[in-house]
Image: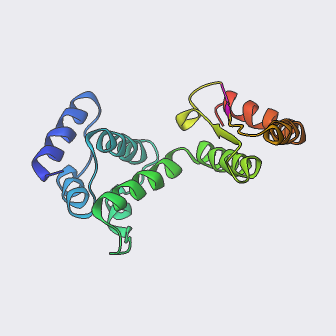
């Protein structure tokens, strides 16, 4: 995204919110180091604003201190930035999401018979189980895996319903 578009988006964002300090520096850092889609940019700016206003963090120092390997594209670096900011802004949800994904991976094992999915950012109240059977034996395996992991499945669902 070019600097002009970023500046326009920050200006629109700032009209609705308190002005971010040193927005020109922030624009320059974002456009030089990262590629962000419009929706990702809005989310990044929102989190940076919250960190600056409410947590009194120096967002410029934070952004300048990020040094991802040059092996990554600007788009990959933008995704990494967004992930890091979400972790910084929502530490408990990020931790819970990581734990849930780890549990799901363990239950799915090979992922060929049971596939599980959860609402994005834990913004929902369901756990989706997809069962794929191709042979009679697959049915027994699915039933056994669900029975063996009943308590873990209940725990995952509870965490989702509590939002992390």
Among the 4 quarters of the image, the one containing residue 42: top left
Instruction: Indicate whether residue 127 is drawn in magenta.
Output: yes
Q: Residue at x 18, y 46 (%)?
A: 6
Residue at far top of view: 125
Q: Residue at x 64, y 32 (%)?
A: 163
Q: Find residue 86 and report its horizontal and vertical position in percent.
A: 48, 47
Instruction: Indicate whether residue 65 is drawn in magenta.
Output: no
Q: Nearer the viewer, residue 85 or 37?
A: 37
- Left or right of 12? Residue 144 is right
Q: Residue at x 39, y 54 (%)?
A: 79
> What range is drawn magenta here?
126-130
Q: Nearer the viewer, residue 151 or 80?
A: 151
Q: Nearer the viewer, residue 141 or 27?
A: 141
- Left or right of 157? Residue 9 is left
Q: Main secondary structure of the magenta part?
A: strand
Q: Residue at x 21, y 30 (%)?
A: 15
Q: Find residue 67 and report its horizontal and vertical position in percent.
A: 37, 72
Question: Which quarter shows the C terminus?
Answer: top right
Q: Colour scheme in the image?
A: rainbow
Q: Find residue 48 and report its horizontal and vertical position in percent.
A: 37, 47
Among the 4 quarters of the image, the one containing residue 35: bottom left
Q: Answer above or below: position of 2 versus 69.
A: above
């Amino acid at each position: 995204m070019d600097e002009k578009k970023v500046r326009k988006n920050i200006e629109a964002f700032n009209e609705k919110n308190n002005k971010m300090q040193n927005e020109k520096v922030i624009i320059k850092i974002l456009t030089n180091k990262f590629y962000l889609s419009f929706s990702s940019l809005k989310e990044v700016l929102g989190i940076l604003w919250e960190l600056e206003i409410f947590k009194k963090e120096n967002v410029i120092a934070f952004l300048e201190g990020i040094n991802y390997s040059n092996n990554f594209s600007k788009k990959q670096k933008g995704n990494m930035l967004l992930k890091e900011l979400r972790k910084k802004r929502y530490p408990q949800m990020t931790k819970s999401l990581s734990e849930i994904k780890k549990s799901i991976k363990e239950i799915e094992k090979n992922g060929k018979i049971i596939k599980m999915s959860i609402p994005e950012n834990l913004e929902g109240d369901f756990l989706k189980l997809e069962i794929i059977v191709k042979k009679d034996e697959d049915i027994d395996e699915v039933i056994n895996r669900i029975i063996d992991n009943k308590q873990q499945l209940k725990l995952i669902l509870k965490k989702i319903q509590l939002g992390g």
